[in-house]
Image: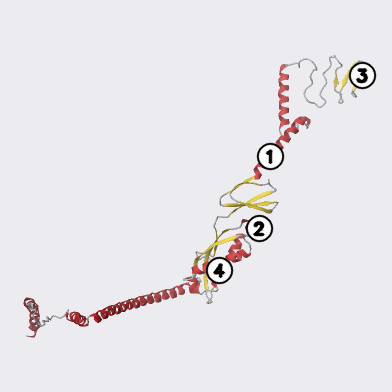
Amino acid sequence: MPWQNNNDGGSQDRGPWGEGGGSGGGDGPPPRNPWGDGPPRRPNGPRPGGNRDFDDIIRRGQEKLRQSFPGTGGGRGGFDPLGGTNWLWIAGGLFILWIALSSVYKVDAQDRGVVLRFGAYAGTTDPGLHFKLPWPIDSVVMRKVEQINSVDIGAGDGSNENLMLTGDQNLINLAYAVRWKIRNPELFQFELAEPEQTVREVGESAMRAEISKASLTDAIGPQRAQIAEQVRERMQEILDSYRSGIEVRGVDIKQADPPAAVDDAFKDVTAAQQDSQAYLNKSRAYAQQVLNRALGEAAQFDALYAQYKLAPEVTRKRLYLETMENVLSKVDKTVVEPGSVQTYLPLPEVQKRARPADTATTVTASPAQ
C-alpha cells in the first residue's frame, strides 16, 4: 500500500494521516479508522473495560437511528446508502398520499363542481363522489346552484333615498330586492367577474325603465306587482344576453313612497282620494240596492199579470182587498159590508178607547175655566 513504510526497527503500517499501525503480531496500538469513526481498538481480544463495549453498542445504534431520519446528513460521515434508500421510501409515500388526497373530491347535493384543467373548463360534475387528475393539473370550484341569493337595492328604512322618475314626471322613492340563483355553473364561472354587482346594476336599470312608463299613482298602488314582474322579465333578458348563467327568481318591491320633502302633502292627497273612493263605493252600493228592489218589483208585477190573464175577476177582487187592507190597517175604523154575514161589533173595546179620550178632553179644558 502507498502508506506502508519499512524501517530498520521493524515494519509498521501508517495511515495517510500518520496514525501508526502495528506490524503483524506486534504490541503497538491498533490501526485507527481514517474516517475517525469510533475509538481505537485492538484487532483481537476484548477491549479493556466492559462498560466501553456497552457504550459502543449504544453509540452505533444512535448513529443508525440518525441515518434513518431526514435532515441528519447520514451521520458524521455525511453520506449513507441506507439513509438514501429511506429517503426514497419516504418521498414515494408522500407522493402516493398526495395523489390520493388531490384526486378524489365530493360534491354536495346543493352544489355543482366545475372542473378546471390548467385553468380551462373541463366539465361539470353532479352531486356525489368523483375523481380527477391531481393538483395542480385539475382543480374543482364548487357552485351552489340551489341556493337563492338576494340583492337589496335602496334602503327600506328610509335612511337613503333611491329616487326614480315616473312617467307623469313625478319622483318616487323605491326600495326592492332581487332574488336570483345560478342556472349554469360554467357560464357563471367564466362570463361574469362580479356576479352580485352585475345583478344589482341590471336590476336598477330594469326598474328605472319600467317606472318611467308608469304614473306615480300606479307605481305606489295598484300596479306594483305588475311592475315587479315586468322588471324580472327584463332582467332575465339582459342577463341572458350577457350569457351570465343566472336565473332571476323574482323582484319584491318593499317600499314605494314619494320623496320625504313632499311626503306629508302626498299623504293628505292620498287620504282625500281614499275618502272619495269610499263615497263612490257607498253610492254604487245604494244604486245596486235600488236596482235590485226595482227588478224584484218588476218580476212581481210580471207574475201578477200572468195570474190576472188567467182569472181577471178574482185577481181584481184580491188586489182591491189587499189594497184596502194596506190603506185602512192603521185607521180606527170598522167596515161592515152588507150581506148574509152577521158581524160582531166590539163595543167594549170602543168604550175603553172612548174613556181615555174624554179624560184627556176634560184635563185640557180645566185650566180655561
Residue at mark 1 to residue at mark 3: CA–CA distance? 60 Å
Between disc 1 and disc 2, whose residue precedes? 1
Q: Are marks 3 and 4 in contact (CB under 8 Å)?
A: no
Amino acid at dot 1: Ile
- Please tell me whether mark 2 sits on a helix, a strand or a loop: helix
Describe residue 220's horizontal placement relative to residue 200 as left or right.
left
Mark before the other along the chain sequence, 3 or 4: 3
Which marked residue is nearer to the observer: mark 3 or mark 2? 2
For label 1, count other residues whose C-alpha is less than 10 Å away and answer few (under 14), some (14-19) or many (20+). few
Marks 2 and 4, Cα distance to the nearest angstrom?
A: 27 Å
Res 190 label: 2
In this view of the protein, can residue 70 be seen by the observer?
A: no
Q: Which quadrant does the N terminus fall into?
A: top right
Q: Mark 3 or mark 1, which is nearer the start of the sequence?
A: 3
Whether residue 246 is visible here, answered yes or no, is: yes
Task: From the image, tell me which residue sits under label 4.
Answer: 207
- Vertical comparison of 85 with 335: above or below: above
Pointer 1 and pointer 2: residues touching (CB < 8 Å)?
Answer: no
Rate crowding at label 4 as few (under 14), some (14 to 19) or many (20 or more) other CA atoms within 10 Å.
Answer: many
Label of residue 6 in the image: 3
Q: Which residue is mark 1?
A: 96
Are the residues flagged by discs 2 and 4 in contact, CB closer than 8 Å?
no
Q: Which class describes the residues within 10 Å of circle 2: few (<14), some (14-19), or many (20+)?
A: few
Residue type at mark 3?
A: Asn
Q: Nearer the viewer, residue 64 or 189?
A: 189
- Can you tell which mark lies on residue 168? none
Could you say where residue 31 lies in the image, as x and y percent from the top left? Answer: 83, 20
Mark 3 vs mark 4, foreground winner is: 4
Q: Secondary structure at mark 1?
A: helix
The Cα–Cα distance between marks 3 and 2, rounded to whole angstroms, is 86 Å
Residue type at mark 2: give it.
Phe
